[in-house]
Image: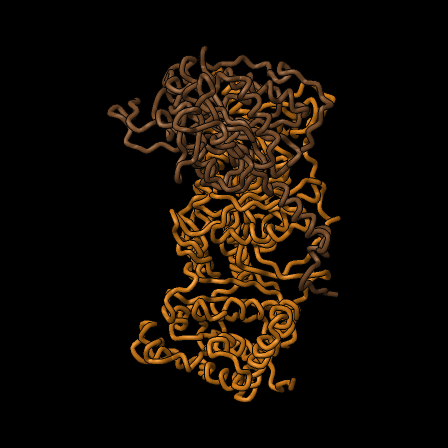
Chain colours: A orange, B brown
């Protein structure tokens, strides 16, 4: 393909693909991201789609978006504002106008800007004028008619023809950023192996878009983002849900246990169940349960029988699993419960992100019911924390709640693939057949965990259950025994702190302001803190992955900072938790409850305000 | 799970060291004895048994069995037992439940375990009342029953367990009487041997809150005339003189007397629990006194694919062809790229 001579280098760029939920924007975005990642850019992506599979066509509610941020250096967020917006209809402009950088580029399908669609989007006449976008670089392209023209000899029905228009837009974007089409073309060949004419049509349209952009010199100069200087190794793009599933698979292999997942489909967690259901080749027993309760109860049964047992869900499902988590606490069986958080309460905002299930995870059960709670912080480290969740569950004989969120689950980034040999062995505390009689609640001196006696093993027959027991496993309602057992179960969880890493401070370990985050806000917080730092502000960051128990050096870390601000996508659940666990510090808060991740801009602005407050 | 004759175990070996705490005279005691007797005849080593229960009087059962046991939470025994069996198909998994546990709070899990045909033996103690919470009506209480929560009589239609099981695509359904140890033992053995979900409804007496609820049918004086004990391949006859039987009249079953109205023994229907079409079995399961005798014995027993075997077969099949043999293979699969 002919190279454009006018090329400039840029450090980073943010592109947002946006259209009706049936326009294929998620696919365009994914293909672009994969191409960028293969080229060697660091990337971060964020899909943002409506809860309805097909919301009313042309309406703002039905707009589906996919944002990708690519850079020559480290990229930690999908970006606050887009340099380039692809808008397949007027509603896409309406939904995204405030998320485009001033002077940015907008490519839109002119054919779709009919009077009717303009009105549907809530405009009177011209979106470009009404949004004051005339200082932007506007590339109005008759995409629909160009696609029809390109495919006129294919003999395809009009619906199929128009379905390829996302590829025309993608072709244009490839030209804008000087990208090769090879990966995308290979994708078509694989995806439509049985329908070569469809594969060919998509290729033709993709190229048509590319050449069209070249012909009209859609954007001069073409922007080049050189590969990021990343460490040697094998990489792949991975989203949070897949990374979570793979982390569990890795843990099962390292523990030499079969993996069992009992789950009920729920947005945005379903991807984990789907990913594991596909892994029969690795011996996974996946069970699509009749409901959320059966999901965890089958898993608990499988745990009793000696599997690495897992259930995955989102907030409403976690609520339904509460009683069974209590049973896992009481029977001291290993189980990993994954909560891919979404906006709540109740059904809330199924496809939007939030961090508001923290209190539910920590305390949403009857009785004194302590469990380990940990949180992943990037799409790819879902792998590490899923592995860690399984390791803690097995080695400490306890339920572990792993918190991710919609943003991590669907977002993706390049990930340096680990070798299995780099991961630690997991050692299940199996009961010894030679130490009879087997006492179900006899505890390890250090961890206070009990032993795991697997049904089928001769001599270890025993009974467990939800009723309070003595060390022998006998049901007991005795006052002293109950208090003792409650304290032992709590202490067992506290002692997990002995095996988790200390907090890492990003930036100086003593400073004016410590930004505190937990879980999935990491990318935005680290970007904001780095930028503030380079602008001369004395700001550092800690991002918590271990929530219960908290790392042992928490207080010590906090004490070296003049001010502490806790940033989270809820009304202050982690801030309140810290107030209870580590008193004596003043915790300021930055909160957002909009179903969206933070923006770097808003974190920076609020941090500066806190720094300037006397 | 292989059934062998090698192991010589006695019913006593299945007794745990726990004191049995059911009320004196409760039907559960007899069920426990029958189950321990049946288990000792299966030739399966003790450590291969897992007893799973939910909540209710009967759900204390696992504590009294010297096997692996899991006393779960209310209504969820079917789900827990499913997990146990799928995780390890080599185990003989038994679920102990009641009419409240299985059909009210656990109704959803119950119909789905039956539908999936997971090889679990479910013993459903039906006393038509809530015992552990001290006497409220249950989903099997007859319409009009006066209880603490239905002081003016229930206004709900009861479930028929067999009807529900067949409706849920069940392949094994049997009914027995708590006090009939020999019939019960035989049925539990049949249930254990059946590959797939076996549901055994036990007409069980709650001596405190619903005493004598099954007595109209099962009382010593009347039971020969009011129950029909089904035997595979034999004619469905009953009565003190074994002189009554069932025939099909139109689309309905009818009770007839042999020797009257030109009916002779050859006219009486032959029981076939293995017939896949559940039509007659459905009618047998639903027979109620006084129009009919209540059917006891194995009503339906039809072999079919089991979930836990199918999942293992699928795993074996996929493993043969997949290029991914371990995690390293998976990690490197698809579109991975190298940075040098």
Residue sitting farthest toward the top: B24
Q: Is residue B248 visible?
A: yes
Q: Position of residue B5 (x, y in %)?
A: 71, 24
A94 lies above or below A461: below
Residue drawn where x is 53% and y is 43% of the image: A558
Front position in the image: A494 or B165: B165
- How many marks can you see? 0
Front position in the image: A86 or B195: B195
Left or right position of A8 against B124: right
Residue sitting farthest toward the left: B152
B165 lies above or below B265: below
Q: Position of residue A253 (x, y in %)?
A: 70, 44
Q: Is residue B72 visible?
A: no
Residue drawn where x is 50% and y is 66% of the image: A66
Front position in the image: A107 or A593: A107
> Where, by quadrant of the figure, is residue A212 drawn?
bottom right
A101 lies above or below A585: below
A146 lies above or below B8: below
Q: Position of residue A332 (x, y in %)?
A: 57, 30
Residue sitting farthest toward the bottom: A215
């Amino acid at each position: 393909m002919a190279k454009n001579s006018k090329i400039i280098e840029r450090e980073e760029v943010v592109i947002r693909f946006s259209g009706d939920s049936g326009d294929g924007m998620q696919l365009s975005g994914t293909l672009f991201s994969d191409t960028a990642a293969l080229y060697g850019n660091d990337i971060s992506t964020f899909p943002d789609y409506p809860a309805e599979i097909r919301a009313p066509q042309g309406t703002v509610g039905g707009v589906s978006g996919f944002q990708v941020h690519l850079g020559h250096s480290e990229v930690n967020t999908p970006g606050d504002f887009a340099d380039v917006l692809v808008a397949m209809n007027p509603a896409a402009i309406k939904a995204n106008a405030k998320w485009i950088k001033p002077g940015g580029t907008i490519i839109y399908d002119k054919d779709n800007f009919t009077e009717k669609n303009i009105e549907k989007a809530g405009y009177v006449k011209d979106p470009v004028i009404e949004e004051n976008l005339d200082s932007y670089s506007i590339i109005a392209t008759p995409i629909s008619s160009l696609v029809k023209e390109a495919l006129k000899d294919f003999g395809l029905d009009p619906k199929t023809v128009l379905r390829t228009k996302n590829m025309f837009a993608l072709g244009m974007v490839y030209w804008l950023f000087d990208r090769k089409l090879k990966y995308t073309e290979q994708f078509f060949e694989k995806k439509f192996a049985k329908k070569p004419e469809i594969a060919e049509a998509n290729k033709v349209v993709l190229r048509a878009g590319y050449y069209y952009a070249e012909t009209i010199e859609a954007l001069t100069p073409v922007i080049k983002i050189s590969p990021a200087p990343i460490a040697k190794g094998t990489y792949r793009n991975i989203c949070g849900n897949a990374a979570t599933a793979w982390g569990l698979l890795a843990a099962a292999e390292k523990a030499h246990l079969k993996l069992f997942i009992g789950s009920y489909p729920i947005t945005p967690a379903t991807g984990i169940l789907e990913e594991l259901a596909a892994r029969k080749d690795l011996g996974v027993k996946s069970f699509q349960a009749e409901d959320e309760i059966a999901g965890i109860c089958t898993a608990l049964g499988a745990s009793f029988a000696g599997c690495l047992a897992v259930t995955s869900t989102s907030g409403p499902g976690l609520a339904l699993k509460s009683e069974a988590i209590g049973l896992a606490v009481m029977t001291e069986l290993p189980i990993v419960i994954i909560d891919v958080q979404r906006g709540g309460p109740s059904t809330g905002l199924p496809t939007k992100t939030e961090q508001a299930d923290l209190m539910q995870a920590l305390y949403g059960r009857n009785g004194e019911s302590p469990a380990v709670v940990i949180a992943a912080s990037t799409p790819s480290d879902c792998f590490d924390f899923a592995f860690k969740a399984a390791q803690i569950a097995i080695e400490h004989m306890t339920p572990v709640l792993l918190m991710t969120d919609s943003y991590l689950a669907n977002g993706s980034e390049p990930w340096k693939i680990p070798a299995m040999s780099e991961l630690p062995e997991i050692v299940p505390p199996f009961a010894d057949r030679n130490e009879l009689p087997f006492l179900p609640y006899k505890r390890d001196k250090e961890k206070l965990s009990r032993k795991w006696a697997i049904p089928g093993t001769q001599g270890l027959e025993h009974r467990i259950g939800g009723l309070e027991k003595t060390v022998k496993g006998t049901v007991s309602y005795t006052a002293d025994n109950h208090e003792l057992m409650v304290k032992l179960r709590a202490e067992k969880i506290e002692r997990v702190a002995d095996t988790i890493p200390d907090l890492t401070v990003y930036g100086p370990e003593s400073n004016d302001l410590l930004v505190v985050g937990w879980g999935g806000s990491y990318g935005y917080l680290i970007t904001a803190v780095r930028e503030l730092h380079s602008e001369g502000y004395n700001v550092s960051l800690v991002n918590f992955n271990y929530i219960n128990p908290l790392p042992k050096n928490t207080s010590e870390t906090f004490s070296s900072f003049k001010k502490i601000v806790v940033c989270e996508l809820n009304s202050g659940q982690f801030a309140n938790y810290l107030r209870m666990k580590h008193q004596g510090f003043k915790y300021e808060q930055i909160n957002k409850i909009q179903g969206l991740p933070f923006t770097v801009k808003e974190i920076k602005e609020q941090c500066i305000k806190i720094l300037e407050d006397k | 799970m292989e059934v062998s004759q090698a192991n010589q175990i006695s019913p006593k070996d299945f007794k745990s060291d726990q004191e049995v705490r059911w009320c004196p005279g409760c039907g559960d005691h007899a069920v426990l004895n029958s189950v321990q007797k049946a288990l000792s005849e299966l030739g399966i080593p003790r450590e291969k048994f897992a007893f799973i229960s939910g909540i209710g009087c009967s759900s204390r059962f696992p504590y009294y069995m010297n096997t692996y046991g899991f006393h779960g939470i209310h209504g969820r025994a079917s789900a827990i037992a499913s997990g146990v069996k799928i995780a390890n198909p080599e185990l003989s998994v038994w679920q102990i439940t009641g009419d409240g546990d299985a059909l009210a709070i656990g109704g959803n899990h119950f119909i789905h375990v039956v539908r999936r045909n997971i090889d679990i033996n479910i013993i459903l103690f039906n006393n038509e009342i809530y015992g552990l919470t001290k006497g409220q009506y249950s989903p099997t209480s007859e319409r009009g029953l006066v209880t603490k929560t239905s002081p003016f009589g229930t206004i709900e239609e009861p479930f028929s367990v067999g009807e529900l099981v067949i409706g849920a695509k069940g392949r094994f359904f049997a009914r027995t009487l708590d006090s009939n140890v020999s019939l019960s033992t035989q049925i539990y053995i049949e249930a254990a041997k059946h590959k797939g979900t076996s549901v055994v409804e036990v007409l069980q007496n709650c001596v405190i809150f619903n005493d004598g609820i099954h007595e109209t049918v099962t009382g010593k004086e009347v039971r020969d005339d009011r129950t029909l004990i089904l035997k595979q391949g034999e004619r469905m006859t009953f009565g003190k003189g074994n002189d009554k039987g069932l025939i099909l009249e139109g689309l309905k079953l009818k009770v007839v007397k042999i020797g009257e109205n030109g009916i002779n023994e050859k006219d009486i229907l032959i029981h076939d629990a293995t017939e896949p079409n559940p039509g007659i079995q459905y009618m047998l399961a639903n027979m109620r006194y006084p129009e009919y005798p209540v059917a006891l014995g194995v009503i339906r027993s039809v072999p079919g694919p089991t979930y836990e075997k199918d999942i293992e077969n699928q795993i074996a099949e996929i493993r043969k062809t997949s290029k991914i043999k371990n995690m390293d293979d998976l990690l490197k699969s698809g579109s991975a790229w190298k940075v040098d």
